[in-house]
Amino acid sequence: MKHNTLQLLQLKNCVFRCLPSILILCMLSFVFAKYPVFQQLLPTKVSSLQEISEVMENGNGCVKLSVPTLTFTGYTYKEKNSIKGGYYYTFIENKCLFVLVKTKKMPQTIENASLKGKAEEGGTIFQSFVHEFAKDSSLEIDALSQITLPYYINEIHYPYFSHIILWCILLIPLLLSIFNILLVFYFCFHPEKSTIGKNLSSYGDISYYIKTINMQCYHSLVYRNTNILITDDYMIYTTLTDTIIIKIAKILYISKHILPKKKWANKLTPSYKLTLSNQNEMLNEFIFHDEKEIDEIMNVLITLCPNIDNKTMEYWK
């Protein structure tokens, strides 16, 4: 006969508890390997016009750029009648680059500016702004257009919110999965902190009871089926993800109930619920689909502990 110890049951529970987290990690790893997720969510550090153009061609458009000086154009940017920033310009490689800076103070110049914004192509509004700026500066529009880049850096509309949401969507499952795996293996090596340990702590010294149950599983196993192990003193209910230990001497009464069928399940085999109550009025309930199986378990428990109140062994519909 195959024997089980609490450590083996705990290891089985650990493996199956880890499976969802492992699947999530595999899915996220595939996404990270297949798609340039981090490249899309992080600004690309650039120092030349060539690099800015490449970033825009790749579809990201979020750049981080350092320039020695920004000069205010005199034009502000408003949203809902509220000033959100101002238009500044700087020169890179003898080309004029306009920047929409997120600020309310509007200093005439900004020295050693570090910009993090979205590189956007100049649309109709941008072209109108360049035209007005040329008139105010007494510059020829054609001459300004020749040295002005067809895009600008927009600090105000940098997608902070959408990036934060995407980071949360990716990182929260990743961190929770890693935490769950570490927690499961911690319980594996420290069973006293797990469900099994907390279950046994009400009886006394956990390590003593673990040794006792392991010994009885080897030498005093009186009943065994798919989910239930019964020794001389303990009933162990184990599933893929959890293990519950009940001291038979603590059981006050047991009962069997037929669970009512749903209307759509009339043709299915009825289910049965085994209820155990202990001295602290704590209930443990287990579902079975085989009436013979539940009857065998009840008879074994009553044989091992005749003091169990079995008057409630009725079918309750």
Image (tube, grey):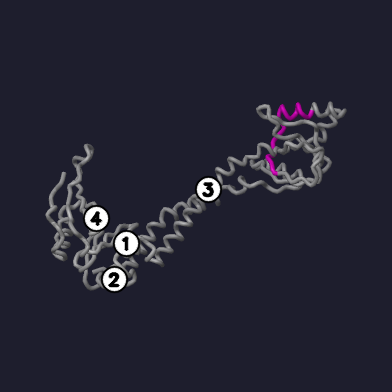
The residue stretch that appears in magenta: 116-130
Q: Which one is nearer the viewer's eye here, 56 or 135?
A: 135
CA separation in Å, label 1 and label 4: 15 Å
Which callout, 2 or 4, points to the residue nearer the camera? 4
Task: Name the element at disc 2.
Answer: helix
- According to the picture, the residue beneath numbered tag 2 turns out to be 214
Identify the amino acid type marked 1. Asn
Identify the amino acid type marked 3. Leu
CA separation in Å, label 1 and label 2: 15 Å
* Residue at 16 percent of width and 58 percent of height: 298
Identify the amino acid type marked 4. Glu
Crowd tier of the residue under label 3, counting other residues whose Cα lies within 10 Å: few below 14, some 14–19, many 20 or above = some
Q: Give percent across and percent down for residue 125.
A: 72, 27
Q: Are marks 1 and 3 in contact (CB under 8 Å)?
A: no
Give the image quarter of residue 309.
Answer: bottom left
Q: On the rendered image, what quadrant is the N terminus found in?
A: bottom left
* Residue at 66 percent of width and 46 percent of height: 43
Sequence-first disc among 1 and 2? 1
Q: Are marks 3 and 4 in contact (CB under 8 Å)?
A: no
* Residue at 34 percent of width and 71 percent of height: 207
Crowd tier of the residue under label 1, counting other residues whose Cα lies within 10 Å: few below 14, some 14–19, many 20 or above = some
Q: Which one is nearer the viewer's eye here, 45 or 286?
A: 286
Q: Are marks 2 and 3 in contact (CB under 8 Å)?
A: no
Q: Are marks 2 and 4 in contact (CB under 8 Å)?
A: no
Task: Name the element at disc 4.
Answer: loop
* Residue at 40 percent of width and 66 percent of height: 190
Please indicate, yes or no, whether residue 34 appears anywhere in the rendered image: yes
Sequence-first disc among 1 and 4? 1
- According to the picture, the residue beneath numbered tag 1 turns out to be 199
Which callout, 1 or 2, points to the residue nearer the camera? 1
Which callout, 3 or 4, points to the residue nearer the camera? 4
- According to the picture, the residue beneath numbered tag 4 turns out to be 281
